[in-house]
Image (cartoon, rainbow, N blue to C red):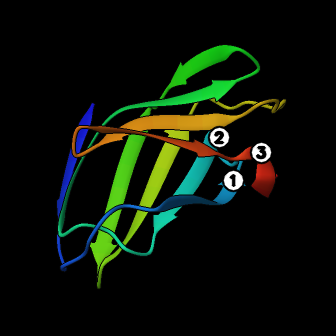
Amino acid sequence: MALLCAGALGARAEIRFQSLDNMDGTNIVLVDDNAPKSLKVTEVVLLNDGKKYPALGVRCNLGDSIAAYELNFERLTYFKDSKVAMKVNGHKVTVDIRKGL
């Protein structure tokens, strides 16, 4: 699954965890306050307790150099050593979501 977004000017990505909810699956929101002007997001996976869960849906909102990545996974009820791994513009990005839980 690949997602391409285009919008405002920006620089290097600094993606961080924002939120998680379990309504209709496990939904994770990541934010980049200094996003590049265009994004291609691929290979989105949730790593949790030694298992990999591929994204069921990926949505990206981009504007004013801020990107919000809305990621949907199968519903999980237990979170341990949880991270999101994905490629943004061909570069591997890993975001530790444990700190926000």
Q: Position of residue 40 (x, y in %)?
A: 21, 47
Q: Residue furthest top?
A: 51
Q: Residue at x 66, y 14 (%)?
A: 51
Crowding near pointer 3: few (<14 within 10 Å), some, many (20+)? Answer: few
Q: Which numbered disc, 3 or 1, marks the residue that appears first in the sequence?
A: 1
* Residue 77 found in image quarter: top right
Q: Which mark is residue 20?
A: 1
Q: CA distance from mark 3 to mark 1?
A: 11 Å
Q: Residue at x 63, y 36 (%)?
A: 83
* Residue 50 found in image quarter: top right
Q: Determine whether, in the image, residue 63 is placed left or right of residue 8.
A: right
Q: Indicate which label's residue lies in the foreground, 3 or 2.
A: 3
The residue wearing badge 3 is 98
* Residue 61 found in image quarter: bottom left
The reply to whether discs 3 and 2 touch (Cβ–Cβ < 8 Å) is: no
Q: Which numbered disc, 1 or 2, marks the residue that appears first in the sequence?
A: 1
Q: Position of residue 84 (x, y in %)?
A: 56, 38
Above or below 1: residue 100: below
Type of the residue with mark 2: Thr
Q: Which numbered disc, 3 or 2, marks the residue that appears first in the sequence?
A: 2
Type of the residue with mark 1: Leu
The residue wearing badge 2 is 26
Type of the residue with mark 3: Arg
